[in-house]
Image (tube, helix red, strand yellow):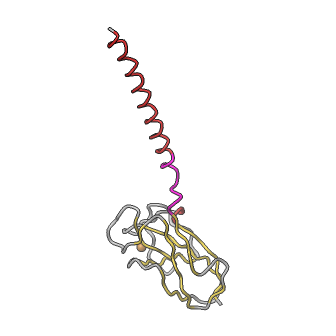
């Protein structure tokens, strides 16, 4: 009898331990559900507010995702785009192919850009191997003056 009496106690302990593990797991899941702070892009060059010549170097920074040539869709991977005077492309939508949306589908992390003199908003936009945007969270904008 004492053996059977002690069994429920052990079970309770096990259930309690299981509940703790579940809470920890749920807590981690909740943390994972928030936007991943480790994934972002930036324009390393030029810097915001810079005045540059008509041909200048753009350098892309990517954190938390891999840069790969366009073609295959691979999780947490993609290539850089430079948007000129355009808003970030909505997540899941294809980045247009035109003069204002330049693709670096070979996996380039820098490029020489030529623009006529004027004020520009440059936006780095990361998108997957099928050119589908990762959205505003994977974009970053600066203002520059081309002299
Ligand atoms: Cu693209």
Question: Compared with residue 54, is residue 5 higher up or lower down, i.e. above or below?
Answer: above
The C terminus - image quarter: bottom right
Q: Quadrant of residue 76?
A: bottom left
Measured as percent of width and height from the top left, residue 12 is found at 41, 22
Measured as percent of width and height from the top left, residue 43 is found at 56, 75
Magenta stretch: dominant SS?
loop
Chain part drawn in magenta: 31-39
Q: Is residue 136 left or right of residue 128?
A: right
Q: Is residue 135 left or right of residue 106?
A: right
Report the residue at 44% width, 63% height from top: 93
Question: Compared with residue 41, is residue 10 higher up or lower down, i.e. above or below?
Answer: above
Q: Quadrant of residue 140?
A: bottom right
How many marks overall? 0
Instruction: Kindly give the residue lying farthest to the top in the view shown.
Output: 1
Q: Quadrant of residue 78?
A: bottom left
Question: Compared with residue 3, is residue 36 higher up or lower down, i.e. above or below?
Answer: below
Q: Is residue 66 left or right of residue 140?
A: left
Measured as percent of width and height from the top left, residue 105 is found at 39, 77
Report the residue at 64% width, 77% height from top: 48
Measured as percent of width and height from the top left, residue 103 is found at 44, 77
| Ligand 1 quadrant assignment | bottom left
Report the residue at 38% width, 21% height from top: 10
User: Residue 79 versus residue 115: which sits nearer the camera?
Assistant: 79
Question: Compared with residue 124, is residue 1 higher up or lower down, i.e. above or below?
Answer: above
Residue 34 part of the magenta segment? yes
The N terminus - image quarter: top left
Report the residue at 48% width, 45% height from top: 28
């Amino acid at each position: 009898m004492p053996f059977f009496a002690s069994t429920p106690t052990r079970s309770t302990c096990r259930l309690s331990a299981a509940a703790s593990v579940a809470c920890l797991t749920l807590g981690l899941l909740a943390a994972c559900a928030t936007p991943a702070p480790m994934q972002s892009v930036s324009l390393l060059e030029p810097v915001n507010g810079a005045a540059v010549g008509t041909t200048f170097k753009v350098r892309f920074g990517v954190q938390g995702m891999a840069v790969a040539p366009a073609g295959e869709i691979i999780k947490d991977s993609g290539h850089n785009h430079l948007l000129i005077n355009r808003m970030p492309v909505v997540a899941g939508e294809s980045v247009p192919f035109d003069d204002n949306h330049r693709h670096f589908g070979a996996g380039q992390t820098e490029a020489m850009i030529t623009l006529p003199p004027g004020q520009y908003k440059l936006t780095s936009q990361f998108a997957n191997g099928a050119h589908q945007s990762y959205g505003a969270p994977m974009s970053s904008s600066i203002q520059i003056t081309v002299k």
